[in-house]
Image: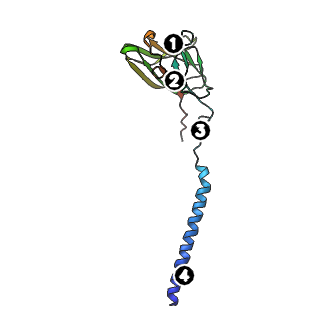
Amino acid sequence: MHNHSYKFSFLVGWCCLLSISVVIMVAVIAKGSNQWKETPSEGVAPEDNAHIEKTYAGNETSPWRHSSLCFCSNTTLLLQKDLVIISTEGFYYTYAQVTFMEAHKGTMTLVANENVPGKAVRKLSEADGGGTVSMSTVILLRNGDSLKLNILPQSLILRDTSKTYWGLYRLPEQKDK
C-alpha cells in the first residue's frame, strides 16, 4: 500500500510540475509577443514614401495630375509639368495604363531623361495596341533622372481617371546576408 501511494504522489507532483511549466511558457510567450512585431525593411525609412501616381488631366501646361489613389506625402518623387523627377537612386517599379477611344490603336512609351542636358535619353518601355494598353517594368533610376510617358495619338485618350494613369514606386533595398 505504501508503494501505491508513492506512485500516486509522484504522478500528482509530475502533473503539478507540467502545469506550472505551461503557465510559465504562456507568460513568456505573452510577454515576448511584442518583440515579434514586424519592423520596417532596413533599406527604407518608414517615412520614405517613394510612390507617385498620375492621372491624365489633358491640358498642355500640365497633362498629368496627382491621383486621388496616391494619398502618400511624397518626398523623393517630384512632378514638374509632364515629368517625374527622381531624387533618390534605386530600383523602381513603373506601371501605366492608357485607354484609347473606340478601340483605336495607340502607343505609349516610357522615356527617361528626354530634353535633359548632360543625360542620355533612354526608352525604358513601350506598348501599343487598341482599346486599353498596359505595361509595367522594373528599372534602375539615378538621382536627377526624369521620367515621361509619351502617348500617341493624344487626341484619342480617354480622360477617365480609372482608364488612363501611370505611376512608379521605389522598391526597398535588398541587403545580402
Q: Residue at x 54, y 23 (%)?
A: 67
Disc 2 marks which residue? 167
SS at mark 1 in the image: loop
Disc 4 marks which residue? 9
Q: Real-space Cα distance between discs 1 and 4? A: 86 Å
Nearer to us of marks 1 and 2 is: 1
Q: Residue at x 61, y 31 (%)?
A: 48
SS at mark 4 in the image: helix
Q: Real-space Cα distance between discs 1 and 2? A: 16 Å
Q: Real-space Cα distance between discs 3 and 4? A: 55 Å
Q: Real-space Cα distance between discs 2 and 3? A: 24 Å
Q: Nearer the viewer, residue 151 or 141?
A: 151
- The tally of labels here is 4
- Is disc 1 in contact with disc 4, using a CB cutoff of under 8 Å? no
Nearer to us of marks 3 and 1 is: 1
Disc 1 marks which residue? 58
| Nearest to N terminus: mark 3 or mark 1 | 3
Q: Real-space Cα distance between discs 3 and 1? A: 39 Å
Nearer to us of marks 1 and 4 is: 1
Image location (x, y in percent) of residue 170: 54, 29
Image location (x, y in percent) of residue 21: 57, 67
Type of the residue with mark 2 = Gly
Type of the residue with mark 4 = Ser
| Nearest to N terminus: mark 3 or mark 4 | 4
